Image: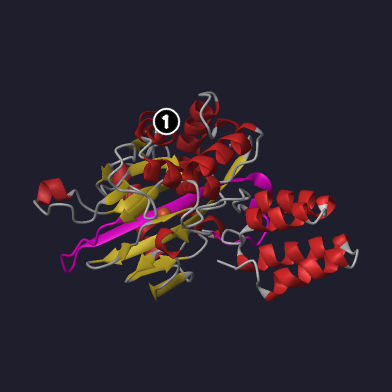
Amino acid sequence: MDAPTSSWWLEVLRLCRAGDQTAAVELYREKLISSGGFDVPVGLHLKFLDGGGFTQAAALIRHAGLHAGADVSSCALLRGGDLQNAVAEYRELFASGAATTKMVVNYMTCLSRLGAAAELAVVADPEHLFYRGRLIPPEDIPVEQFLSRVAAALRSAKERERNSKHRSGRELDRVHRTHLMDDPAIRELHAAIRTTTAEYMRKVAGAGHLISAWLPKRFDLLSWGMISEGIGYNVPHVHCGHWVSGVVYVEGEDPALSGADDAGLLRIGAGVDGDPGCPGWPDLSVAPVPGTIVLFPSYYTHWTVPLRRPGSTRISVAFNVTPVADVDSAAPVVERVSHQS
Ligand SMILES: [Fe+2]
């Protein structure tokens, strides 16, 4: 996290004091973009700006911070801070329409540290926000045949990076930006994901949930493939900058059928920074059975368990839902690894 004394931040303050709030805001925006935005302590900076009477700069930076997916609360998870105050501030911000996935993650962490299980369960709400179903393949194609074409396209993709250390992945291959791949099977896969996602979005948008109002009315998908052979897995993480994420399994196996305990499972559970003993966290497991599609809020902390067996393979395509306008930009797909906060 950038400390309030970092050099670029001191330069922002200097520009404000010199009377050039426009240049200060411009510098701040550049920093938000270059750093990904999620870990810039925007709320703390706003406190300084408001305290100094730089209200114009504060208002613009607050807007930029929200757009970048940062946490604009003033007491975001300060160690030793007042959790009750933090929770009250988050509620106030959410009620005013100011929210990002990172803010919800931090809000849930505060709730769990307070032992506020009931409130935590309302935000997690897996009964309404977690979806697991079967992918509907294109017409007249058996699902196994369709998934085999998808797997072949991913294996041979030029975008495949062997043993990628990208984001949350460990010991696995990553196929970057599958939403841009010009392959018929991959395009059909995206059409199938869109169908299920549209239904999920429609249901959640009308449910009066915390995230209902912030779902994009028109959306597209940012996706990437993962190929794990034996030992590959993902560490616990969330997907900042988005509200809905998901995954489709192309190849894999049900550990319940092979007697392999939890091998290969997708797990959704307590946030790493929160109190795992608080009962309100979601606690879900998904077997990587080919054709399974899963959707959930991007603020769910999730990870995968290695298959462990040599020769076994798990292939999946993960995705974030994004407003249509973002797809044409070069914006990277961003995951936030939870234990790095
Ligand atoms: Fe993920």
Pick the front one: 32 or 231:
32
Q: Amino acid at mark 1?
A: Val
Q: Viewed as shown, does residue 62 lie left or right of 110?
A: right
> Which quadrant of the figure has residue 95?
top right
Pick the front one: 333 or 209:
209
Residue 92 point in image, percent of width and height: 61, 35
Q: Is residue 334 above or below residue 59?
A: below
- Looking at the rendered structure, the secondary structure element under dot 1 is helix
Residue 290 is at least partly visible in this image: yes
Q: Which residues are magenta?
A: 304-333
Q: Is residue 313 above or below residue 274?
A: below
Q: Is residue 54 above or below residue 91?
A: below
Whether residue 312 appears in magenta in the rendering, the answer is yes
Q: Quadrant of ligand 1?
A: bottom left
Q: Quadrant of the N terminus?
A: bottom right
Total numbered labels placed on residues in the image:
1
Residue 216 is at least partly visible in this image: no
